[in-house]
Amino acid sequence: MNNIRNFCIIAHIDHGKSTLADRLLEKTNTITEREYQAQVLDDMDLERERGITIKSHAIQMEYFHDSKKFILNLIDTPGHVDFSYEVSRSIAACEGALLVIDATQGIQAQTISNLYMAIDHNLEIIPVLNKMDMASAMPEEVKDQIVDLVGCKREEIIEASAKTGMGVEEILREIVTRIPPPEGKAEAPLQALIFDSIFNSFRGIIAYIKIVNGTIRKGDKVKFVNTGHEYNAEEIGVLKLKQDPREIMKVGDVGYIITGVKVSAEVKVGDTITHAINPCEKAISGFEDVKPMVFAGLYPVDADDYEDLRISIEKLQLNDASLSFIPESSAALGFGFRCGFLGLLHMEIIQERLDREFDMDVITTVPNVSFKAYTTRGEVIDVHNPSGLPPVNHLERIEEPYIIAQVITLSEYVGSIMKLCIDKRGVLKNQVYLTRDRVELTFEMPLAEIVFDFYDKLKSISKGYASFDYYYTSYQKADLVRLDILLNGEMVDALSTLIYRGHAYDFGRKMCVKLKELIPRQQFDIAIQAAIGAKIISRETVKAVRKDVTAKCYGGDITRKRKLLEKQKKGKKRMRQVGNVEVPQQAFLAVLKLD
């Protein structure tokens, strides 16, 4: 056990975590040249296409130092704020962390929040200054920032370049010498922490575990503490590039266990596995339930696929524990699910994965956050969906969630970023100059305002130099109204939004104009209206497609043409009464793209 080291790599987006992981795997000969490809641990097509890490990936390496063999368990983690739950789980399974910082960009917001998470778990932090081969690297300035933030000595910071392989040998030596071995008792009852799981259609659910105490052998009868179910350990092993079966796993090992469980509800991330005969006294603490920030409805395009969609979401939830869902129904879209996501990127990725991995075609409604509605009877209702809002005459007040947002940027962009945040109803709380030209701005603002396009606008205003991180504070009273979209007088509940009163008129007008572009013309006029309660605030009309009924009239009196047009008019009138409007999928997504 003294020769095991468990560590993870944490950093902001694009600071070179996955590339550094590639170099470590090459240096320890874990992968052969034939198996090598860039971002070797990112096994999803989506991750490669976008160049981001979505899932934490665990892999075991062997490293020889002073003629002793060390086993290194590496967990590569995502950098985007939407996947910070993945990072928290990886940190719970480690004793040390490599804090990777880009020498060209310096410390950014996600670096700080991931670092605090690691310090909370008492991890040994090894700071690594990456991208030293770049011409624009600023090693001395960034080292000052690191010393201020981490409180380490300047000489402890490792200069490296994941691209060229510089400093990788030194990183491996530091991991072995500075990170402590796992603590645990081999003779104690078995305690294994589940930190991830995947679904395999042949083997059932494969759980990834870290053994905190005790040992486990293949064929042992094990028990899941939270659910109380008992199973046989059909296969156990460690995670190399592929799964590598073993007969026995001891304290400190990180690996996988296959028990043949088929029901996804029985495996919970953060649960503890123990022996059925000699169980441990209590479960391992380490995970809190994740709080979704953004809610949206997912509906199958074909109503018959509802059950398939439910099974697909359950399987996806195994692999991504931060996704939560409950069934709901909509008058316009039929039966579907109200899903909770950690952010808009998370929502987009889930939609893509449903399409690619499970071949599910889904319609997504307008994302929103959850509000608290206080009624005149003194009840408090959690509103995840605009249609769940009580009638206006029963409503006393609505409260919405507020966040503290931290933006780190170059000083030249401060003015335009302040304007953006104040337009989004933000209040400046603090402004700190970290260095001569880097500023940390702290705002308090409503979560609903950052759900849509805040991050994209922030990036474009600051030419990509601003980094953003937020945490949730409390609910505060808000002046919100429900904006409904009516098509031919009928409300489309999937397009309803809860919105700040001051922004409602603008938003309603833009929605109507956008829908006019997207809704195909029918044989009758379609009225698109935005309404707050009974008050219509905007209207656009999609004109009817008209058949030229007078084509057969050549010459003759105008009354003959008039007669044909009158006859057409009667038919149109009848059509309008029964006419139903088809709304294309793009219309539901267009709301997200409103500028």
Image (spheres, rainbow, N blue to C red):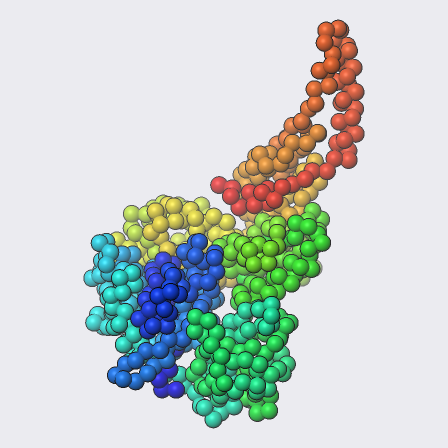
Task: Tell which residue pokes out farthest to the front in this image.
Answer: 34
In this rendering, the answer to whether 295 lies above or below 143 is above
Compare residues 393 and 401 and report the one nearer the observer: 401
Residue that appears at 34% across and 76% down: 124
In this rendering, the answer to whether 147 lies above or below 432 is below
Task: Tell which residue pokes out farthest to the bottom in this image.
Answer: 187
| The image quarter in which residue 341 lies | bottom right
Residue that appears at 62% across and 78% down: 227
Residue that appears at 27% across and 84% down: 67
Mark yes or no: residue 144 visible.
Answer: yes
Task: Tell which residue pokes out farthest to the top in this image.
Answer: 556
| The image quarter in which residue 170 lies | bottom left
Residue that appears at 54% across and 85% down: 218
> How many numbered marks, from 0 up?
0
Image x and y of residue 306, in percent? 69, 57
| The image quarter in which residue 27 lies | bottom left
Compare residues 379 and 235 and report the one nearer the observer: 235
Image x and y of residue 479, in percent? 56, 49
482 left or right of 130?
right
Image x and y of residue 441, in percent? 36, 55
168 left or right of 306?
left
Quadrant location of the N terminus in the rendered image: bottom left
Image x and y of residue 472, in percent? 48, 62
Mark yes or no: residue 405 visible.
Answer: no
